[in-house]
Image (cartoon, rainbow, N blue to C red):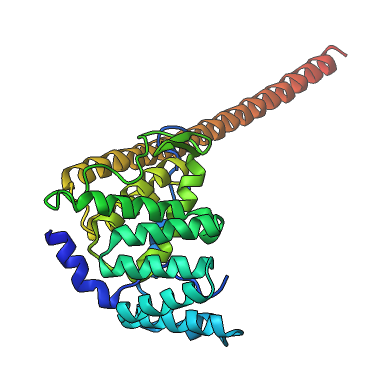
Amino acid sequence: MKMLISLALLMPWTVFACLELGDETPRDHATRTGGDNRAAQDLRNSMAVSPRELTAQAKFGEARTEAQKRQAEAVNKIYAGDLEGAIALLKGIEDRSPGQHSTAVNLGTAYELKGDNVNALKWITAGIERNSGSHHGTEWLHILILKAKIEAAKHPDRPLVSHIVWVPEGMASGSMILVHGENHSAEYIRSALAYQLSERLVFMKPKDPYVADLLYSYALIEANLSAVENGLGLLQLAREYGFPDEDLLKRQEQRFQSVVQHQRVKSLALVLLGVVTLMLLTDYCRRRKEFFIRCLVHFKARRAALTAAARTAD
């Protein structure tokens, strides 16, 4: 309940990304390191954006139809925290023009911010049915978040009893991961997490257990498919968002750091090997040069001696 109360206090100032205004290091495989931590930085850039900077007009421009104007007005009400007003306006739009994808997802967002996750799930599901390709086909993650919230309401002392998206310790881009009964490639899940989180973090600032959990899963995928450093940066973000299991975070960080350290030692060893090899080759060449010089001197001296002996004999 404490988590739900905290979320409720944030509602007037937060809105999720699912609003519509119109219709570098595999840890267990290649084990690359040296990433630039871009994944975490991109999300931090999203965190730095203030929701108050975003308005329906700014995003939409000039509304082209009366229906779009009403959608823009509803989105502005959501940004302003007038959730009841937004819901009433959107229901009116649905009555007059039923079946619009934008109406469904905006209603789902408004209900989620209001704390009515059951109705939010109903309308976000309707939005997917109306347009499955919305948000690059990643709205299934929004569905999973809402289901996790509904489940958490049954035992508020434990907001999350399992990961929203479970990912294995080791994987490659082609690895298949089972997510709520459906198999997806690790690369697809990585893209979905990146997209949904980059939108969601614009509006949801720390702390939030659902974002924290998704960041943890994203960290594991990035560490395996991109660079371990990316995973470390995302684990730190998960901590900032209130990931509940600090011991698990530390263990995972230690694993990642050990890989980074191993690669550094390996790289240093290769550099030293190269230096030693170059030194030995240089010394070999020097010795060969000296050997040939001595041979040449000896040959010249021998030739001179033979020439002198021949002259004496004459």
Front residue of this view, candidates 100 and 234:
100
Instruction: Looking at the picture, tell me which residue is in the foreground, 298 or 289.
Output: 289
Relative image position of residue 115 (x, y in whole percent): 25, 65
Residue found at the very far bottom of the displayed protein: 62
In the picture as drawn, the residue positioned furthest to the front comes out as 95
Image position, residue 84 (x, y; %): 30, 78
* Spot occupied by residue 22 in the image (x, y as percentages of width and height): 55, 74
State the quadrant of the N terminus.
bottom left
Q: Is residue 302 above or below residue 221?
A: above
Image check: 232 left or right of 239? right
Going by the image, does 20 lie left or right of 293? left
User: Visible in this render: residue 38?
Assistant: no
- Image position, residue 5 (x, y; %): 15, 66
Q: Nearer the viewer, residue 35 or 195?
A: 195
Q: Work out whether residue 44 or residue 16 is closer to the camera in this orientation and state it.
A: 16
Give the left or right position of residue 28, taking residue 3 as reference.
right
Q: Is residue 202 visible?
A: yes
Say which residue appears at 42% left-offset and 74% top-offset: 91
From the viewer's perspective, is residue 50 above or below residue 288?
below
**Residue drawn at (31%, 48%) of the image:** 216
**Residue visible at 50% across and 69% down?**
102
Residue at image coords 27%, 64%: 116
Could you say which quadrant of the image residue 290 lies in?
A: top right
